[in-house]
Image (spheres, rainbow, N blue to C red):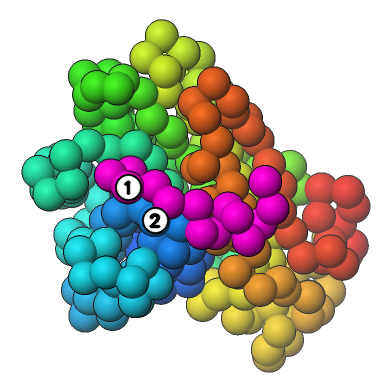
Amino acid sequence: MSSDQIESFPRPGKTAIVTGGSSGLGRTSAVALARAGWNVTVTGRREAELQETVTLLNKAAGREDAGFFVAGDITKEDVVLRVFKETADKFGRIDLVFCNAGISPPNVPLAEQKLSDWQATVDVNLTAPYLCARESFRYMEKQQPQGGRIIINGSISAYAPRPFSSPYTATKTAMTGLTKSLSLDGRKFNIAVTQIDIGNAASEMTAKMKSGPGVPQADGSMRHEPTMDREWVGKEIVHIAEMPLSVNVANVVIQATNMPSHVGRG
């Protein structure tokens, strides 16, 4: 199937939840899914930006009921429960959950790092995907047809960390273990789980790669790095989402070609 066919492939009734959908990769991926015919719920803390995303979703889908948002902090269990309940109530089922929301604390030497930054990173990058995955299982196990797909936004830092990135790298490495465990547990219920590791997609989080002094390198220097259009991430999310549940991409890396990465930093 060509990329154009993937983008236009109709999926009536198929429903996705995208966390961190108010901007960046989350918004881009949500719009790509809506364009491919999916109903999409986006979550995040910024209600005005979520409403903007919903407008884009409806425009991409060519209908006024494709997008839905639930505002809140998905590190909180009650918010996650509400996101899933309201999505199921509106659309009838949940077929895909893209655990995209993530943060990166300041890149400072370990001795200068704050416990509060560590905890916030763990909460957003690890606890939130766990809560969303757990709730995904609860719905996907019971719905008919049974099953669904979970995509977790990992990072190349799980293979090749940057200097001064202990909180971020620790959470992204832990997400690899979470993904593997979920994949194993999901087999019985026709739930497929993918980890997508994204390198230098242009977004608010990666703006520093092309401005100011740049970002830390393995040799201690600061340099600018190439980024890629995040539309390619959206296309990849749709590609994985459109697969039958008998097929799974366990792990995929998508990155700016010339960035320092797991094939060699510095």
Pick the residue in front: 60 or 5. 5
- Asked if 242 appears above or below 62 in the picture, the reply is above
For the residues bearing labels 1 and 2, Cβ distance under 8 angstroms: yes
54 horizontally vs 232: left or right? left
The answer for how far apart the CA atoms under marks 1 and 2 are is 6 Å
Reading the chain from its start, which is encountered first: label 1 or label 2? 1
Q: Name the residue rendered at 60%, 69% in the picture.
A: 230
Return the residue at label 1: 12
Secondary structure under tag 2 reads loop
Name the image quarter holding the C terminus. bottom right
Q: Name the residue rendered at 63%, 81% in the picture.
A: 208
Q: Amino acid at mark 1?
A: Pro
Task: Specify whether residue 121 is in view.
Answer: no
- Does the stretch in magenta take in 48? no
Q: Position of residue 190 (x, y in %)?
A: 42, 18
Secondary structure under tag 1 reads loop
- Asked if 194 appears above or below 196 in the picture, the reply is above
Q: Which residues are magenta?
A: 1-15
Pick the residue in front: 106 or 86. 86
Task: Specify whether residue 54 is in view.
Answer: yes
Image quarter for residue 112? bottom right
262 horizontally vs 96: left or right? right
Residue at the bottom extreme, as displayed: 212
- Asked if 203 appears above or below 103 in the picture, the reply is below
Q: Position of residue 229 (x, y in %)?
A: 66, 73
Q: Amino acid at mark 2?
A: Gly
Return the residue at label 2: 37
Tell me if mark 2 has few (under 14), some (14-19) or many (20+) residues whose alpha carbon lies within 10 angstroms of its own. many
Q: Position of residue 85 (x, y in %)?
A: 12, 41
Q: Position of residue 199 (x, y in %)?
A: 69, 59
